[in-house]
Image (tube, coloured by chain):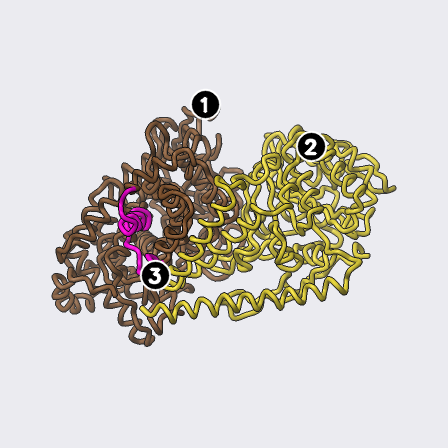
Chain colours: A yellow, B brown
Amino acid sequence: MNSTLSRRRFLTASSAGVALGSSWLQTLAAHAAANKLTPPKSCILLWMTGGPSHIDTFDLKPDAPDGFRGEFQPIDTSVPGIQISEHFPHFSQRMQHAAVIRSMTTPESDHRLASYHVHTGYQQRAGGLSFPALGAIASAELGRAEFALPNYVVVGTGPRGGTSSGFLGQRHQPLYVNEAVRGVQYVDPLVDNQRFDRQLGLLRELEHSFFACYQAPASQAHAIAIEDSVRLMRAPELNAFDLSRDARQDAYGPSSFGQGCLLARRLVEAGVPFIEVNMREASWDTHQQNFPRTKALSLEVDAALAALLDDLHDRSLLDRTLVVWMGEFGRTPQITSGGGRNHHPKAWSSLLIGGGVRGGQVVGETDRTATEVVERPVPIVDFLATVCQLLGIDQTKENRPPGVDRPVRIVEQDEKPITELLS
Amino acid sequence: MPRMAACFVSVAVLSVAFGVAAADLKPSGSSARSTVATSSNVSSYELARLIDERIDARLKTAGIPASAVAADAEFLRRVYLDLHGVVPGVERVRSFLADDSADKRTKLIDELLADPRFAAHLADIWDDYLIPVADDPRYGKQRLAGWLEEAFRSKSWDRLAYELLIASGQRDQDAEVTYMLKGRETLSPAELTDLVSQYFLGMRLNCAQCHDHPFAPWTQHDYWGVAAFFTQIQYTDRRQLKSGVIRDDPAVDVGKLEDADKLRTPRFLDGTAPPSGRDAPLRQTLARWITSPENPYFARAMVNRMWSQFFGRGLVEPVDDMHEGNSATHPELLDELTEQFVASGFDLRFLARAISHSTTYQRTSMPAPGNEEDTTLYSRMAIKVLTPEQLYDSLSVVIPATSGRKPFGRNADPREEFVQFFRSEGDPLATAYERGIPQTLRMMNSPDLFSPRNESATVRRIVEPAAPASEAINCFYLHVLARRPTDDERRILDDFLAKHPGNREQAYAEILWSLINSSEFSLNH
């Protein structure tokens, strides 16, 4: 085979990449100069794996008939007229920063398909495109190319359906951190820096030789993963992962979710634009024993969320950090014989907090049993368009996925952002 | 330049005679047997010729040139990974490269197919399909893998599938029931319908669960008709994790169940209903229908999956979305392979032998001028990413365990822990590299792989440090990448050794690290 020609092809391809990168950097620099006073926003997605019961958290129906009405009492919040479950006592006092959306309505009732839909804004189609999660979109739109940390981090174990970067590719894949307190594993080299550099140099040289022959796109993706990993190993920002240094560590509570929230705040401070923190595996999936489980989970979220909001507020980060609370769907208002509630995507609740949201509001309404949306239905495109606008992302922008001959919008069209939440 | 393998000469003559027979083959759906002899070795070689004819004809029409046949080393590593799920050991690499007999590829394929490792590899693949996430380690995934391995070793595909479909019994004794369990619950009729249709029929019925499928001809009616077959499943003793029992109660009447508004009378996908007045459990009736040679979907689905296992994509892609609106790249070939697979008695070794013996499979993955853009017509071999199981097993071959130490990992089941750590999110294409930072860091910095303490012993197991540099370089390439280095690579490594400030052993350890962390090691090319 003609290796000279192939090598030239490789070099052309990589220098094209560099050229692309640098013009992008220039644009970004110009953009930054124009907006010196408004640093880019960040988003923390608190992902309630399993689908929380809306009627037992933020859309209580004390007057619903037996068999629907839950066991929990509504309580007043810091905003007159807004009531939520008694098991959010701390968060209720910070309602002025938050908007409750009680009219989420989505099509998927399977965990995996619903997680995909809510994360990406698209339905997963057989043989269709692999769509990027919101976090990957934020990484592409708000992330800095020269930044040593990944621009998208997912914290916590559990199912991660829909969190992939899809067609946006390897560059925007999330960094998955299983346990917040353990941080990134295997980040320390086994050998001294000089030796590490030497073997890495050898690896790069040998890679050129292989790529020249086989020209595999997988080789390029592999190279990106190596370079990103090495950059992370050397990043001074790595100390963001060391929670033990944080004065507020105890405030977040000992749960892995609480510590995940602390990690999220530290990553926001370090400049990461998107962090997802998910709760334990399938925790909100309360087909049985809905009430004791939902109570315990609510209290766990309440403590961590209140600590997070106070911490962000005290550091003047709350206005530029959007905190989103949601799962993949709600739960059936009708209580099952096992004291549980099943999957209910037709009507459910989410929260948007900080990040420039006009807080202290409720959007939408459900009927007397919280089964159907009766006012201002919010399909996922409306929700994501609102989040995009709050973060400064143009949701109408079109991507051109490789190998696809049609443009794909960040958020599918006919979206109607919730204007009353935007300042 | 790779040379055309001489072993094809011996069978080339058959393809002329077979050209006539191939024209007689009827397209799918028909139960007519072909004129080709069944179940014998000759037949799988003839089928290999047919594959090449069909593939070459399409390439010719499209005006796309085919790449050359792969060199021996490339073929050897590939066929090991595809049939055994692991790279060849260095001794086998040396002996294969040194062998100059004309039929050595044929002999190698037979050797690999006769080895129990072939069944173990298929078991790995199917274990992941049926139980993607490890549940209870004692009574879950691992035990099913053991059952599958034995079944793939001794049973035909229709028999194996039938036994899985009718699985019943006690969890700790009848391992085949484990795929039907999630924690202490059985999968629901809807979940079983999804699983069975996806893996045994090559179709995604699940979209039809809530609405009529927008692209495929399946309706909600079809979906709940199949789900009804699973409504008699009873799970007793569920509090005892290990002794829960699955069985079917033929007395359960579908019409009286909680979801009765959705669940219909049991109905097969071809619209027919099972005979009434039966005594057998519904599930058994469904299993018979699914695994019947007359079933137009069952054999086809497996042929398409096996094809994708070798080529990184199915003749229909995605492999589990086969329907009229999603046509095959090579429709006649899919029909013919299906027919021959049925005629062979659902013999997976027959199918694997035919595919791995074809020139199409044995082509190099290096692009040739004019076929760089082709990804669907098989002008060159696809480059696949090693699965986590392939990666773990290959690392175990390449990094020899030093005495008194497990290969790597301290977990109770290090392989399963490793596999879960390297598992990709979602269901990426076989050719898409999606490994992230955590996995890359582990490959670079895991003390289980590159313990500085064992460095010297590891290097010495691969090469004698006193050996001349050129021989040592050769050793490392044969050992890690199952091939000899190119002149370019030799030059790079000579240079590296000449400039290296430390001792030889340390330099060799660095070379080992670089080769294991190369993209080539993580790919099947």
Q: CA distance from mark 3 to mark 2?
A: 59 Å
Which is more foreground, mark 1 or mark 3? 3
Q: Which residue is mark 1?
A: B240
Q: Which residues are magenta?
A: B466-491
Q: Position of residue A83 (x, y in %)?
A: 81, 39
**What kind of element bears circle 3?**
helix
Mark pair 2, 1: CA separation: 31 Å
> Which class describes the residues within 10 Å of circle 2: few (<14), some (14-19), or many (20+)?
many
Q: Are marks 3 and 2 in contact (CB under 8 Å)?
A: no
Label 3 lies in what chain?
B
Does residue A69 appear in this view?
Answer: no
Q: Quadrant of the C terminus of chain A?
A: bottom right
Query: In front: mark 2 or mark 1?
Result: 2
Whole-percent x, y for residue A53 in the image: 67, 39
Residue placed at 26% from the left, 55% from the top?
B73
Q: Name above or below for residue A194 compared with residue A403.
A: above
Is A244 colored magenta in this rendering? no
Q: Are marks 1 and 3 in contact (CB under 8 Å)?
A: no
Dot placed on the residue nearer the N-terminal end, 1 or 3:
1
Query: Where residue B488 is drawn, which disc sits there?
Result: 3
Residue A279 pos. (x, y %): 62, 38
Is B468 colored magenta in this rendering? yes
Q: Is residue A115 left or right of residue A414?
A: left
Amino acid on which disc 1 is placed: Gln
